Image (cartoon, rainbow, N blue to C red):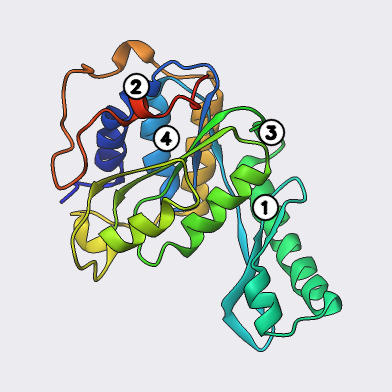
Amino acid sequence: MFIDRQDAGAQLGERLHGLAGVESTVVLGLPRGGVPVAFEVSRALGVPLDVIVVRKLGVPFQPEVGFGAIGEDGVRVLNRDVVRLASLTEDEMAAVETRERAELLRRARRFRGDRDAVSLVGRTVIVVDDGVATGGTARAACEVVRERGASCVVLAVPVGTPGTIADLRQVADEVVCLRMPDHLYAIGSWYADFTQITDEQVVELLRRAASPPGGCPEDSPDPAGDPAGGTADSDPWWGRLPWCGS
């Protein structure tokens, strides 16, 4: 188990030490629970932190089924198979997107305030959450990040099932997961403290990360270590990704 999200983020930061201090790298936390984890990763690596806000586009008559997702900068990612099977019209899709985009912009302003979003063009982007169950939100985030111009997308999570992690490798260049139990009944069961994160806590963490900018590369852990344990692959994955940081 992880003690809390801070502990999980510190362990992820150690596993990702190959990207410490790399200027083109940025860490994005999925609100709300992923932001405390991402904060520790960005601090360990000495790279900027921002928030990644995405909204699922649900089929009007069956909202739990997503036909796509949207992100900032006007990004929209569609699942053409769902659009076709649901026989969605452009007007129906536009109505859903208009509603969800208003909520997306409201949340982005709430979390980030008057600060601009970090540009992702040509950068290595580490998307962080506190765990993945079905992986739907993480998949949408990776797709949106790619559409916003990231050259390399790394998804980093403390816990997820092998099947979900394998599926997410289709949308990310690399997926780093510290614990991969065969059955994941609840993400919170892998934390001793899984207290709900508030909007105010997200705002404060982003403020702390922005001032002063950057992090503390000198605090990065010994690259020879492998503290994560569990069933995750301990092979230094960054050596297998020539496009990340090239």
Q: Residues within 10 Å of mark 3 (few under 14, many from 20)?
A: few
The residue at the point 64 percent across, 32 percent down is 118
- The secondary element bearing badge 3 is classed as loop
Q: Given the image, on which type of amino acid does mark 1 rest?
A: Gly
The single residue placed furthest to the right in the displayed view is: 91
| Mark 1 lies on residue | 71
Q: Is residue 89 left or right of residue 207?
A: right
Q: Given the image, on which type of amino acid does mark 3 rest?
A: Arg
Is mark 2 in CB contact (under 8 Å) with mark 4?
A: no
| Mark 4 lies on residue | 39
Q: Counting residues from the N terminus, which is met first, the one under dot 3 or under dot 4? A: 4
**How far from the left and from the top, in percent, is residue 73?**
75, 45
| Mark 2 lies on residue | 18
**How far, Cα to Cα, is label 3 from label 1?**
17 Å
Q: Residues within 10 Å of mark 4 (few under 14, many from 20)?
A: many
- The secondary element bearing badge 1 is classed as loop
Q: Counting residues from the N terminus, which is met first, the one under dot 1 or under dot 2? A: 2
